Amino acid sequence: MVGATEEVELNRLESQVDNGGGGDWKYLCLVRKLKVRRSDKVLKHGLSILNDSKKRSKLGGEEWTLYEQVAIAAMDCQRTDIAMDCVKVLQKKFPESLRVGRLEGMLVEAKGSYEDADNIYEGLLEDNPLDQVIHKRRIAMSKAQGNISEAITRLNKYLEISVVSVSDLWQIMMPGENLLKSMFHYKCEIPVKFHEYKQAAFCYEELILCQPTVPLYHLAYADVLYTIGGLENLQNAKKYYTSTIDLTGGKNIRALYGICLSSSAIGQLTKGRNKEEKEGTELQSLAATALEKDYKKRSSNKLPLLTATLKNLKL
């Protein structure tokens, strides 16, 4: 998770680089250090260095790291031509490198040739059967193709050769696809449809227990509870939307909307119960006010639409 101070520094550097103020390499290093995906920026500013022989020569050994970083960014941006050029340079420099081999597989995967990519990954695993990155890529490919049974088989194999924390496990898994049951070897059929929200809720509960200060988990859990519905779930959803706001310093728009929506739904279910109707009205009002303030600042032309929406929710 990126801290508030780091995010401020990253945004400052990004603005500086975008406006021609220099610091391209420093920005790219920070993106890599924080493990954030700003692929369009990385592609643009990374290429500006790689295409300038003087700038490139100053990097020393870090030049190859930049080629790798730009290659991955290019794949994200569907610029497989640029990614291919970068991979070719790395293949020439490091012809027997496992790391470059992974990039080659990712490039073929980005083109949609999953079978060919899988063949590349299988070949790499023959040389290094404990490579966790490749195992994760193969799991991701199976999920991307909707082949859940194969994803489960590969996930089980990955667990056999890896030491994985509970937090890592749930992130590798896709909540709602019954992968949970497979992991604990429960005998059950893989459902054809995926919307298994109760299992998804369990996954997010585990993630929150492992990493209670990650707002994304609180938000996702709140969304799942809201989707399940029912008074108790809606009340808990509202609590987790609130904790998301606390963890983000009041900056999460989706959580603010969540409070408004869950409050409205709770109001419909508790109509006529004065005590329950009055509880939390201050929070609802604060959320609505915060939304209006943000829209005035960022998108004033859409403020009437927001006002009408809140009015329909009776907030």
Image (tube, rainbow, N blue to C red):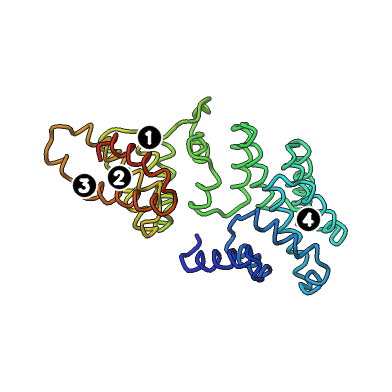
Characterize the local packing of mark 1: few (<14), some (14-19) or many (20 or more) Cα atoms within 10 angstroms: some
Look at the numbered discs 3 and 2 and tell me whether their residues touch, using CB distance below 8 Å.
yes
Characterize the local packing of mark 2: few (<14), some (14-19) or many (20 or more) Cα atoms within 10 angstroms: many
Looking at this view, is 48 or 235 the one in front?
A: 48
Residue 139: mark: none
| Distance of label 1 from label 2 (alpha carbons) | 12 Å
Looking at this view, is 262 or 240 the one in front?
A: 262
Characterize the local packing of mark 4: few (<14), some (14-19) or many (20 or more) Cα atoms within 10 angstroms: many
Q: Is residue 227 above or below residue 222?
A: above
Q: Position of residue 105 (x, y in %)?
A: 76, 46
Q: Position of residue 130 (x, y in %)?
A: 69, 53
| Distance of label 3 from label 4 (alpha carbons) | 55 Å
Looking at this view, is 77 or 184 the one in front?
A: 77
Q: Position of residue 5 (x, y in %)?
A: 48, 69
Query: The residue under label 3 is which amino acid type?
Result: Gly
Q: In the image, what residue occupies the spot 36% across and 44% down? A: 257
Q: Is residue 80 above or below residue 188?
A: below
Q: Is residue 22 left or right of residue 107?
A: left
Which corner quadrant holds the C terminus?
top left
Tag 1 secondary structure: helix
| Distance of label 1 from label 4 (alpha carbons) | 43 Å
Whichever of callouts 1 and 3 sits on the residue coming sooner in the sequence is: 1
Give the farthest residue toward the left.
Answer: 274
Which of discs 4 and 2 lies nearer the camera? The answer is 2
Q: In the image, what residue occupies the spot 83% across and 68% down? A: 53
Tag 4 secondary structure: helix
Query: The residue under label 1 is which amino acid type?
Result: Thr
Residue 100: mark: 4
Residue marked by disc 1? 227
Residue 280: mark: 3
